[in-house]
Amino acid sequence: MADTILEMKNIVKIYSNGVVANDNISLSLKKGEIHALLGENGAGKSTLMKILFGIETPESGEIILNGKSVAIRNPLEAIKLGIGMVHQHFMLVPSFTIAENIILGVEPRKGIFTDMDKAEELSRRISDEYNFKLDVGEKVENLPVGIKQKVEILKALFRGAEILILDEPTAVLTPQETEELFIQLRRLKEKGHTIIFISHKLDEIKQICDRLTIMRNGKNMGTYETTDLTTKEISRLMVGRDVVTKFDKAALNLRETAVSIRKLEVWNTAGTKKVNGLDFDVKEGEIFGIAGVEGNGQSELAQVLAGLIENYKGEYRIFGETAKGLSIKDLRRKGMSYIPEDRMTYGIAENMDLLSNLFANQYDKEKYSGRIFLKKKPMEQAAKDLISQFLIKAGSFKTKVGMLSGGNIQKVVVAREFSDDPKVIIANQPTRGIDVGAAEFIRKKLLELRDKGCAVILISADLNEVMELSDRLAVMYKGEFSGVFKDVSALTEEELGRYMLGIDKDEGLEGIVYA
């Protein structure tokens, strides 16, 4: 590593609601390093990166790029300066080919038309240059998630990115795909690219990053050589305390069968079958884990269970009663709670305040509902209690949810769903994109609910999470279960990854249903 390529000096960002997101933050990057940016949800790291990429404008501060002070007023200016950003949620057009996605917006022309031969040639050239070896004529919708990640990186490189911001790049990758990504990142580093790596996975940061900067409450808590800190020390600097990653689980106390699925088939809106003949039972008092690469039917399954998809074939029973014809409200009255994968679309009303979001599923309960008006004082006190209990960083219960960080929005969703005395919880990616301290809190709550007799269906791409919490674990691949494990303790991440990629398959699937 040689010279400093980027300095962000004394950056201050204050939002209109008075929240100080960045409080005199400074950050320095060296050319040809992989630099981790860490912090709790709401620590200010996303805001800092939005400023660097021109999405947000700071109140004060300076950005120095290659020794020159620059103004970055929008993403186009950032791209022209050699800064690229790969978002956690991919910005690809599924119906386009790899080449069409790579050249989108900077298309080579043949008259008034796009020169597709040239586009494919350029895309193939940059793919080969960085040893990505992609079939640039393949449609993105047909690609596994690990390849989509590569396409996003190539898009940025094609536009001349010397600095790459990667936001939670391994969130939905298998161990095998993560290792392949790390090979590519090391190659980029060797070619002189600088990478900002935003992640909550501390083991991966230790594996791939040269240095790390820790943020807390909008301040820089220090920059360190990665080799100088243990994961325990990193988490302590992030949240101010030791974080538990291993949990002592109480012995199973199985009760009534809460959810029963038989021969379930589900199609997406495009008419593609996403769930193909699933059978399984879940009892009260257990956590039934479902692992799998994103896009293998987990989302559609969760939406059926939550009542969001009504057009399916097969049988879905909740506490022995058919769920066919039951509304979402009916399912909730039976004790079903749902943490959606897409919190922004299905989890919150972003233009409404915390109080409204926290009690959207409970407004008709006697303790909150009067004859004509809602009982404001009990709701306000309960909202204050939930904000405190779930460590939600917000000015007050009057704050609009859309003003919160992604991790704090997730806490709002979880607080609402956990506080409704659930009997069945469908938890789809409950800790995605949140910090280690908040993840620890949510995982403890899931175990507490399990021990109280709740049936928990945990769908997670976080292998540590799903292996640590699950009593039984199934793997979904192309809409089916490729494997089921009754003794999760004997399972390794690598073994699980093979089932997730369809390399291994269990034809017997014993332990999915109860006799």
Image: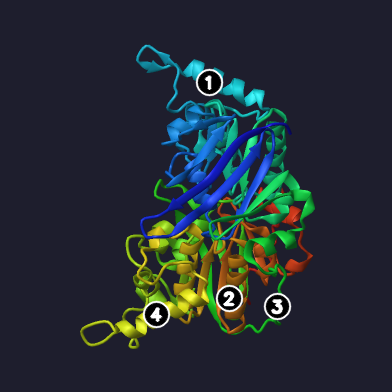
Residue type, numbered disc 4:
Arg
What residue is disc 1 on?
Answer: 120
Label of residue 384 in the image: none
Q: Which residue is most to the top?
A: 111
Q: Badges 4 and 1: C-beta atoms under 8 Å apart?
A: no
Q: Badges 1 and 2: C-beta atoms under 8 Å apart?
A: no
Residue type, numbered disc 3:
Lys
What residue is disc 3 on?
Answer: 249
Identify whether 70 is placed above or below 357: above
At mark 2, the secondary structure is: helix
Q: Nearer the viewer, mark 2 or mark 3?
A: 2
At mark 4, the secondary structure is: helix
Q: Badges 3 and 4: C-beta atoms under 8 Å apart?
A: no
In this rendering, would 85 be left or right of 383? right
Q: Nearer the viewer, mark 1 or mark 2?
A: 2
What residue is disc 2 on?
Answer: 445
What residue is disc 4 on?
Answer: 333
